[in-house]
Image: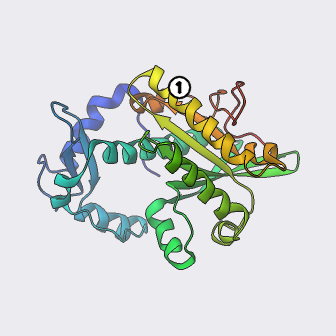
């Protein structure tokens, strides 16, 4: 089990990451490879596995790593592309840490988009950013599994494309059977976490995509309220995700509702 660090350990963790990266920004043959966040004047560094890190995970921990980071591709990365992946990573880390400190719940599975893309090649299904399976030790109304289909929204999709995004996920889950075949369960909560640099933008975007989703659901007319119950929308500030009570506080909204609820609800 990897060590846990408190927020006060930030300076130590940074020095440790720098050592694992070899102290350089351009050497992939280390445990970690680091590069600058692609925006002018920003001193933030992004870390990913180097070749020694991949070998260590496979040899010592037994975690297969079937991808290779190619440093030359950094030049083609956009700020939004990198931030999307950082927010996704931070959400999943926060979920893992939360499950460790809440014995009533267990985060039994995390499946990332690069793994799910392989399934999509076979089934032609959509590729979510991630899929998480929380399990509760004591059942709530006979239910102890809470699967989450996670999507990180960076505000890059306008109305038409976002609605197509929602329709695709509904088809994936409810009609062609691919979802149940891949994940072994028909149940799901579809979570859209939207981000941005200002609270006003984040909230406006959250309300906007919630309205668009509601319009898609009402196209089906019958039982749209039941479909709406599958969705959660929330707004996150990228740099404070670890301090945000994602699972302990009512921060999430269903389409058409102004009342926030917990993420892990029926």
The spot of residue 98 in percent (x, y) is 57, 38
Tell me if 260 is positioned left or right of 22 in this view: right
| Residue most extreme to the right | 141
State the residue in front, 103 or 174: 174
Callout 1: SS: helix
The spot of residue 263 in percent (x, y) is 66, 37
The colouring scheme, among rainbow, by chain, secondary structure or one colour, is rainbow
| Residue identified by numbered label 1 | 203
Residue 237 occupies quadrant = top left
Tell me if 123 is positioned left or right of 9 in this view: right
Please tell me which residue is depicted at 62% across the width and 55% down the height of the picture. Answer: 167
State the residue in front, 260 or 6: 260
Asked whether the viewer can see residue 3, the reply is no
Tell me if 24 is positioned left or right of 61 in this view: left
Above/below status of 155 relative to 35: above
State the residue in front, 160 or 8: 160
Please tell me which residue is depicted at 88% across the width and 45% down the height of the picture. Answer: 141
Identify the image quadrant of the C terminus: top right
How many neighbours does mark 1 have within 10 angstroms: few (below 14), some (14-19), or many (20 or more)? some
The spot of residue 75 in percent (x, y) is 16, 53
């Amino acid at each position: 089990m990897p060590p846990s660090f408190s927020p006060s350990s930030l300076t130590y963790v940074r020095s440790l990451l720098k050592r694992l990266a070899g102290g350089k920004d351009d050497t992939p043959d280390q445990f970690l490879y680091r590069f600058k966040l692609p925006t002018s004047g920003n001193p933030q560094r992004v870390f990913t596995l180097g070749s020694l890190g991949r070998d260590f995970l496979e040899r010592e921990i037994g975690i297969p790593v079937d991808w290779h980071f190619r440093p030359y591709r950094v030049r083609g990365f956009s700020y939004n592309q990198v931030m999307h992946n950082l927010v996704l990573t931070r959400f999943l880390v926060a979920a893992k840490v939360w499950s460790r400190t809440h014995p009533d719940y267990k985060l039994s599975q995390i499946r990332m988009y690069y793994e799910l893309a392989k399934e999509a090649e076979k089934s032609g299904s959509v590729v979510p950013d991630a899929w998480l399976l929380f399990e509760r030790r004591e059942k709530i109304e006979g239910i102890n599994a809470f699967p989450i289909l996670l999507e990180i929204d960076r505000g890059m999709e306008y109305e038409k494309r976002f609605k197509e995004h929602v329709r695709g996920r509904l088809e994936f889950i409810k009609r062609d059977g691919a979802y149940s075949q891949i994940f072994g369960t028909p149940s799901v909560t579809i979570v859209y976490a939207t981000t941005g640099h200002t609270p006003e933008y984040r909230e406006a975007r959250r309300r906007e995509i919630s309205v668009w989703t509601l319009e898609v659901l009402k196209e089906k007319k019958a039982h749209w309220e039941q479909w709406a119950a599958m969705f959660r929308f929330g707004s996150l500030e990228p740099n404070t995700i670890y301090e945000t009570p994602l699972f302990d506080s009512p921060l999430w909204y269903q389409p058409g509702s102004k009342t926030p609820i917990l993420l892990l609800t029926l």
